[in-house]
Image: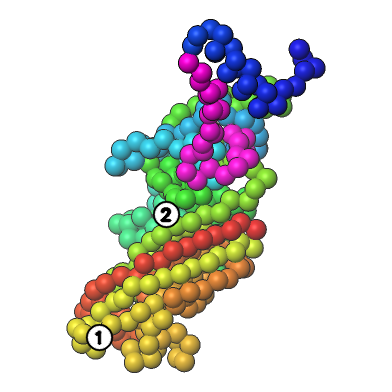
Amino acid sequence: MSGLRLSSGVLSGLLFSAALLADEPATAPPAPPVATRPAGVQPGSSRQMRLHLMEGSVVSGKLSTETVTVETAFGKLEVPVASIVSFTPGLDSHPQERQRIGRLIQQLGSNTAAERDSAQRALADMGKTIHSELVRYVSDDDVERRTRVQKILAEFEETEEEDDTDSSGIRPWQAQDSLETNLFTVVGKISPQTFDLQTQFGPLKVAISDIRRGERETEQKPEIRKSINVGGENLVQLTMQTSVRVNRGDKVQITADGRLTMSPWGNNTFSTPEGSEQFQWYVPNQIPGGALVARVGSSGKVFKVGSKHSFVATRAGMLYFGIAMSPQFATSDYNYPGRYDVKIRVNAR
């Protein structure tokens, strides 16, 4: 029978005849199940991951688990591995690293000059990845510690690095774990705490405390989409809104709508993401007040986005959004009710 092939019509006829002979009502053969994919999972997705380990090595293999759980402040979220772009364990998952960084920062105020100098060199060598830990001590009561922390941060600002990652592309330390999919980024506590990885050299167990960063390996470049709100409190001179991280060569498309009440000019005066010269200028004759703007990285150049903008990233870093405003109107004395609804699409290089 292995060499016999029947058309669907012949097969249906045989089934119908057999049903008549058995005095049974005829029934059509059941339809094959339709395969479905979770939202955001691309064709050809897999559980193949590349893990950057704390000691500097990189290991690749297939995860045994189908999903990764992230426990957030709003509940648990199960993410299919096939939807993951990357994940980065935070210092909560690396208690020993947190203790090491904290110990070095404390040694900046040591009574011994050699210990102070040694700690400063060690912290400076860690690069911008410890920026968030250092800024907690910029106003420390210990004058020596405060001075040295400020000096290290100043050195970071003077470096020629294009973003706030280290030389391996690892992002700065944060307290909680973060997991990025091609639809959103979630922050919380990742589980399992130990990953079973099938490598070319055999099975391997890797604790999350040994992982600095994980990336899913796929031939298809991921597309990241995200929507954010940029409000009147996100003035360039105050606090810009974070969105997604981009890498050099990524293609970025942005659209925006909405409006802000430009209260200094009257409660019935509004601005769109394009801004207007009637609200004065953030950059003379280039970026008007009220315009939606962005920058790549904490020290990147601010550029106008308006209601629609596309660009190819020339550097890597977090993509920040804000509202352009003339300095004299960019203080807490003025309010700008409303928001711009921003949609971002990033296609990896």
Q: Main secondary structure of the magenta part?
A: loop
Tell me where residue 32 sits by quadrant.
top right
Q: Quadrant of the C terminus?
A: bottom right
Q: Quadrant of the N terminus?
A: top right
User: What residue sits 60% from the left and 64% below the top?
Assistant: 251
Which of disc 1 and disc 2 is earlier in sequence?
Answer: 2
Q: Can I make out residue 94 in this image?
A: no
User: What residue sits 41% from the left and 81% below the top?
Assistant: 274
Residue reaching furthest left? Answer: 267
From this view, report whether residue 228 is shown above or below residue 193: below
The spot of residue 295 in percent (x, y) is 49, 70
Horizontal side, residue 89 vs residue 272: left or right: right
| Mark 1 lies on residue | 269
From this view, report whether residue 330 is shown above or below residue 142: below
The spot of residue 200 in percent (x, y) is 71, 27
Residue 42 inside the magenta-drawn segment: yes
Tag on residue 132?
A: 2
Q: Nearer the viewer, residue 100 or 142?
A: 100
The local secondary structure at tag 1 comes to loop
Horizontal side, residue 287 vs residue 266: left or right: right
Give the residues drawn in magenta, as a range.
Answer: 25-50
- Cα gap from disc 2 to disc 1, whole angstroms: 39 Å
Q: Count up the numbered dots.
A: 2
The spot of residue 46 in percent (x, y) is 60, 36
